[in-house]
Image (cartoon, rainbow, N blue to C red):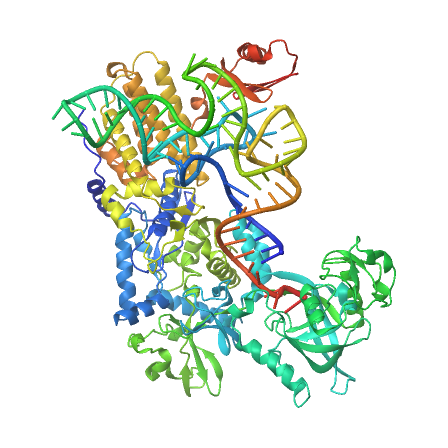
Amino acid sequence: MSISKYDPHVIETKWQAEWEREGLYHAEEDASKPKKYVLEMFPYPSGDIHMGHVRNYTIGDVIARQSSMRGFQVLHPIGWDAFGLPAENAAIKSNSHPAKWTYANIEKQRASFKRMGFSYDWDRDVVTCREDYYRWGQWIFMKFWEKGLVERKSSPVNWCPSCKTVLANEQVLGEGVCWRCKSPVEKRELEQWYFKITEYAQQLLDDLDTLPGWPDRVKTMQANWIGRSEGAEVDFELCDATGEPSGETITVFTTRPDTLFGCTFFLLAPEHPRVKEFVAGSEYEKSVNDVVESAARETAVERQLGEREKRGAFTGRYVVNPVNGEKVPVWVSDYVLMEYGTGAVMAVPSGDQRDFEFARKYGLPIPPVVVAPEDPLADELAGVSERVLADVSWAEAFAGDGTMVQSGAFTGLAGGKASEGMRAVTEWLVQEGRGKFAINFRLRDWLISRQRYWGNPIPAIHCPSCGLVPVPEADLPVRLPENVDVTKGETLADHPEFYETECPSCGGAARRETDTMDTFTCSSWYYLRYSDARNDQAIWEREKADYWMPVDQYIGGIEHAILHLLYSRFFTKVFRDLGLITFAEPFTNLLTQGMVKLDGATMSKSKGNVVAPEDMIERYGCDALRAYILFMAPPDKDLDWSYEGLEGMFRWLSRVWRLVEDAGGPASAATSAETPAAKTLRREMHRVTGKVTDDIERFQFNTAIAALMELTNASYDYRNAVPEPERDGVLTREVAERLTLLLAPFTPHMSEELWREVLGRSQSVHLNSWPEFDPALSAADEAELAVQVNGKVRGKVVVAVDASEETVVAAALAEVQSWVEGKEVKKVVVVPGKLVSVVVAG
RNA sequence: GCCCGGGUGGCGGAAUGGCAGACGCGGAGGUCUCAAAAACCUCUGUCCGAAAGGGCGUGUGGGUUCGACUCCCACCCCGGGCACCA
């Protein structure tokens, strides 16, 4: 039959139009089938799509398409995370409006995604800046408020001077820079809106154990971020300015109550509210203020630069150590954080490296209270309960497990984290009413207000007489006005016609909130909205959400390991507590795909090293690009882009094309007898079916494609080995069909063209069932075994798979006779189907 | 400093404790052709050797095992996350 050329452009556009016409990817609830919700993190409409998008969405598309062939009812939606600063910046640059830029980019990306042949249900798309979406974001805010999870409070916050807005803790990167623009972040004391995510800290930590389908790396990162510490809260009695106990207490959090006897000074954070009062008018005022002011001047970046020396100053005050009644001086130091614990710390220089350095610098005593078993002090101070040694010769603090010394009644107990000494001291404090067991989290409440225009308006009203009042449900949504000119630096706060309003409670004149919500609030629930995206009566219908959710397979970049994934988990738990859903975790399985780089560097427009997918689609078609980006590396690894192999991928697809065209005619009769060559090809077909099925399950798309190449090679071997008249036409057609089916998730257009036009099937290949794999059919009847002598391969034997062990050993020994001759055979190990290992003496 | 990943040919990468380097790229040679392209075929870790064959090889050093890229211990290097969290 005549061979035509594989021409991706014609067939790709043809089938994209046909699928849309047939409504192939429209998802409906169907209780009779198991469902599978496959979701890729939705994109920010930043402009043209890049290789990271191609990789991310191709992975999801392969999973979705194959799941559908395997009989699942598949939901595979897409949308846009459309609010955010880049739109404002672009608008300022082009003297335009953020909405214009955003919608133009969405249309551009929509066209690109369609051109890639992704199997999305376009009837469910979600765009977060559209009113039909953000109104429900405001509704959520209101529900959170009703539940007591919204708070407006003043505290030191992260301020990005370049973005001119505050940021959540999670949005400040490790180097103390803004996650979006990478400018150094400043600290400011501001009144802001918060979601109380800390109320869910324990659940967010505990439920990580219910997620076996998540990478350990991500779970560890989240656990570290939540940062649970077990310890005690200890009350220290404050002395007044004359040094006499005042009856008032200051509480600290510590993970090491067992070291209390070694507490020789007490520290307050520079921002601590009592500091000013303690030193007002005293001789210590100036030196303390110096420390406070220098700390206030520092940015997060400066605070972290190198081995910065700790600074501190004595306040003139004392507190009483509850375990021994000792008066210890109160200092202020810049290494104490106001945001963690109580902003006050008991300092134990012998047990904490920071306290140790501080004590050395300012000449404070360092009495040992927990000593390592191997330390000479362990013998010297064994059983000594009174303080006889006020300082150590150590080079650094000892924070490990050891024995308590110089610790009164607790002397001799084991000391260390979670030690008996720690429990004993805390129990004593509880009895005395001077402390309690306590748990502290590193996680802070989520700061959600942003001083920017292009976001979801916070539905709240400030009333001079009623205070903060939520916008009533009936008045939602608070529409984001269009007449704000960001090119003039305007925000909602510059528009009285927006913020001048009436109090819904008392009817008096009031001011509408002009901050918008963090865009991460928009992306924290979109996956739920897809289950009922067009509902204008409710956020979603419970039945639909219950049918589709949770997401069975979520796919996205590791950069969201904490941010988006933590927030979404939080939202889901709140929705459950609000009775909107019944499950506690939104994403059952998570695949974090690696980044696509160029010469080891992340691609970015500013660096000018962006690889445009369009050019490659133009040259080789999207099927080749899809297959190639999956073939280059396993999905979770970073990938260095290279053009080198793309041509090879196209070459292989052309090879498959010719093979199927050649074999795809009406099946001629099978040859009467099964030849060895036919047997080999048939077996290879079954083996590859099993391998591809298995590899897709494990997301090993690169080896799945390699296996398909092997089947292609085996087909060519058969053709080359058997002259045409003797070929088994039934077999070659079966192999052609099998290749087409197994390739369908990867190269949907080529497979469709081959399936319908060449193989003559009437229905879409994507509606066909995934081929079953029968291990029996892929099993060979003979096996080649390697024969090892003392661990080295010295020969090979071919034996029947059902041969007895004696037969195998005899054949093996004969094969390696020259290596064994005249030596004593000490041991023979037979691994069926693999090898024979002979151990000889000498 | 702490917590995760990862180190395999010229390159991307394969290997439930069982023949290291599948598959692809790149390279060499060949068939076809007036020629080229395309296609098809063969070879391609490294060293010694004409060949047969053999030695050496998965970051380094030890260990377990008949057998280790794989498991254990120590270390080196690269990437990432967190980082004065009391």
- Do we see residue A40 in this rendering? no
Q: Residue A540, relative to residue A286: is it above or below?
A: above
Q: Is residue A322 left or right of residue A138?
A: right
What residue appears at the point 26 percent right and 57 percent down from the top-left corner?
A: A108
In the image: residue A507, left or right of residue A206: left
Q: Nearer the viewer, residue A5 or A512?
A: A5
Task: Report whether A341 appears left or right of A466.
Answer: right
Examine the rendered structure and indicate whether residue B17 appears above or below residue A84: above
Report x, y in % for residue A148: 54, 72
Q: Quadrant of the C terminus of chain A?
A: top right
The image quarter containing residue A411 is bottom right
Q: Nearer the viewer, residue A581 or A702?
A: A702
Q: Quadrant of the N terminus of chain A?
A: top left
Vertically, is A334 above or below A751?
Answer: below
Residue closer to the observer: B4 or A358 = A358
User: Residue A230 appears at what percent x and percent y?
Assistant: 68, 61
Query: Could you tell me how many numbered marks the image carries?
Result: 0
Residue A339: percent from left, percent from top: 59, 71
Q: Position of residue A661 (x, y in %)?
A: 23, 28
Give the residue drawn at x 28%, y 44%.
A622
